[in-house]
Image (tube, rainbow, N blue to C red):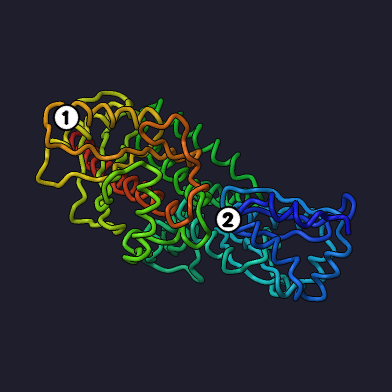
Amino acid sequence: MSINLDGIIKSAPAGPGVYVFRRGKAPIYIGKAADLKKRLASYFRANASDKVRRLREEATALEWIETASDIEALIREAELIKRHLPKYNVLMRDDKSYFYAAITQEEFPRIFTAHKTQLEGKKLRRVIGPFTSGSALRVVLKMLRRAFPYCTCAIPHKRPCLNAQIGRCLGYCCIREDQKARSRSHAEYKKNIKNIIAVLSGKRKRIAAGLRRSMRAAAKKQDFELAARIRDQWEALENVFAHRPLFEVELQTGGGRFSDREWRAIEKVIRTLLDASRRIRRVEGYDISNISGVDATGSMVVFVNGRPVKSLYRKFKIKTVRGANDVAMHREVLRRRIAHPEWQYPDIIVMDGGKPQLNAASAALSKFKIQSSKFKTPRIAALAKREEELYIEGKATPVRLDSLPRPVMHFFQRVRDESHRFAKKYHHKLREIDLREQATHK
């Protein structure tokens, strides 16, 4: 065997991705992993199975493709297996162990997961796969449904279903009597199914770029309601592929809490990372939500000893900034927050954004420090969503979030995501009030 084992294990990244065993140029086995270094090391254990030993003996090269998340690895693995049909993927698995996403051939198609043998004889519009994990595929579909709602009702009915009430179904597709609405909105439903097929087929970036273009076009026409719906779709899609483990994206704030022991370990790393001189108890996260500056809102979420405390959350309606100036809005929110010493000041502030947001927070806090000698300036960090990089006050180079221990990475992401959720919720409320007022004056 010509594979350099020592070199592979040392150079493999400890993150998600897809790996390929090759004989010459031909792939003979393709797999995915949440941690490539650990997974690849498992193939070279002394007690490996006979099939794994044969794979090792036949392979002449091993390579990998790093991905941003487990979900991206799952989809990339399925794409490559379908394209190459590697020999050992067939030997190590059969049709009964692979999973597929099936789209029905109906007026309003439904999507379900099944083994290949369970799909035989069914009238289907499209079958996507093979996927190696049925549970992972179901989680992905559940999350994609938040971005692109579709129907799962078995038969038509008279009233909107629960899924329609919570935004996971468009509502008209499964109501028997509302034929006019069904006909009018058929194109919207078909577009959602088309987008899901494209994402599961590895074309997520193309769909995301299209949503961003549509959002900007709607905002330019001052159709802010449409722009907001498209933005919500884009954000839901990006969240599916966020840099975090597959099943952790399903955790909601308030769930998945850190134990006291876990928080002490996380807190120790954060103190070192941010050069914090005192113990970290209270962490505040800030975000801004607006569409072209309209109905702009700010949020402050509070975590105490690693746990969210919703009674301490605060929301801000932006008062002094006109237009889409995210940095100035952050400055306003921080100034207004600091004016409330009764809220207890934080040890750490986490801004949603990059270097500009970090500088805005630093300027606001420095000005207040001059006014109040008793104010203990907290350490400041800003988390850039797209690059998943953490900007830290006083440090020129940002820290890649995936280079941190996973619990620490998850904590920063949770603070960022919760501040984003809370700001967006308030923004939606203000927008609904404006729409009602506009309807009243017509």
Q: Nearer the viewer, residue 162 or 342?
A: 342
Of residues 114 and 161, the one nearer the viewer is 114
Crowding at label 1, few (<14), some or many (≥20) Cα neighbours within 10 Å? some
Return the x and y of residue 71 as percentages of the image width and height: 58, 55
Kindly identify which residue carries mark 1.
Answer: 368
Residue 440 in the image, given as x and y percentages of width and height: 18, 38
Q: Is residue 51 above or below residue 174?
A: below
Report the side of 97 relative to 288 (left or right): right
Instruction: Tell me: 327 left or right of 374.
Output: right
Nearest to viewer (mark 1 / mark 2): 1
Q: Mark 2 or mark 1, which is nearer the start of the sequence? A: 2
Distance in Å between CA atoms under marks 1 and 2: 44 Å
- Is residue 169 or residue 48 the one in the foreground? 48
Residue farthest to the front, as pictured: 277
**Which quadrant of the figure contains the C terminus?**
top left
Q: Is residue 206 left or right of residue 231?
A: right
In front of the other: 347 or 135: 347
Residue 194 place in picture, x, y as percent: 60, 49
Q: Residue at x 60, y 59 (%)?
A: 34
Is 279 left or right of 18, judged from the image as shown? left
Residue type, numbered disc 2: Ile
Give the crowd class for mark 2: few <14, some 14-19, many >=20 residues within 10 Å.
Answer: many
**Is any atom of residue 183 visible in this view?**
no
Can you give x and y, in whole percent of width and height, for residue 76 in the image?
Answer: 67, 52
The reply to whether residue 322 is visible in this rendering is: yes
What amino acid is labelled 1 in the image? Phe
> On the image, numbered disc 2 is attached to which residue?
71
Asked which secondary structure carries label 1, the reply is helix
